[in-house]
Amino acid sequence: MTEQEIRDAVLAIIQDVAGLDQTPEVDGAKPLRDQLELDSMDFLDIVMELRKRHRIEVPEADYPQLASLDSTIAYLKGRQA
């Protein structure tokens, strides 16, 4: 997947989990939880969806690498190589 495809997929997951009507505007460098007022359960739901849709294991130790949109994209891009 390209970086844009990964970005779109992550934003779609966030939209589904957060129950948003439209794709959120997100600053890629800022923590997602702060921007979108996600609680810890929402964050875990996003991680579980990433695992399911991308068929990758995401160890709990790697969760901090999924804090922002940019870091999530970098993490997923690295995992697909």
Image (cartoon, rainbow, N blue to C red):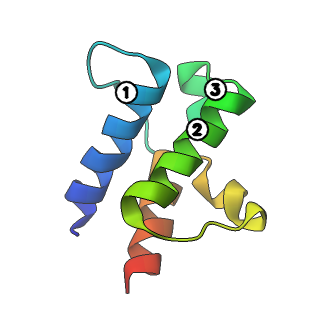
Q: Is residue 29 above or below residue 21?
A: below
Task: Work out whether residue 7 can be spotted.
Answer: yes
Q: CA distance from mark 1 to mark 2?
A: 12 Å
The amino acid marked with disc number 1 is: Gln
First-in-chain label (1 vs 3): 1
In-image side of 80 versus 60 (left or right):
left
Q: What's the mark number on residue 45?
A: 2
Quick one: SS at disc 2?
helix
Are there few (<14), some (14-19), or many (20+) residues within 10 Å of tag 2?
Answer: some
Quick one: SS at disc 1?
helix
**For discs 3 and 2, the disc positioned in front in the rendered view:** 2
Residue 46 on image: x %, y %: 53, 41
The amino acid marked with disc number 2 is: Asp
Task: Work out whether residue 30 can be spotted.
Answer: no
**Image quarter in which the C terminus is found:** bottom left
The amino acid marked with disc number 3 is: Asp
Q: What's the mark number on residue 15?
A: 1
- The answer to which image quadrant residue 44 occupies is top right
**Image quarter in which the N terminus is found:** bottom left
First-in-chain label (1 vs 2): 1
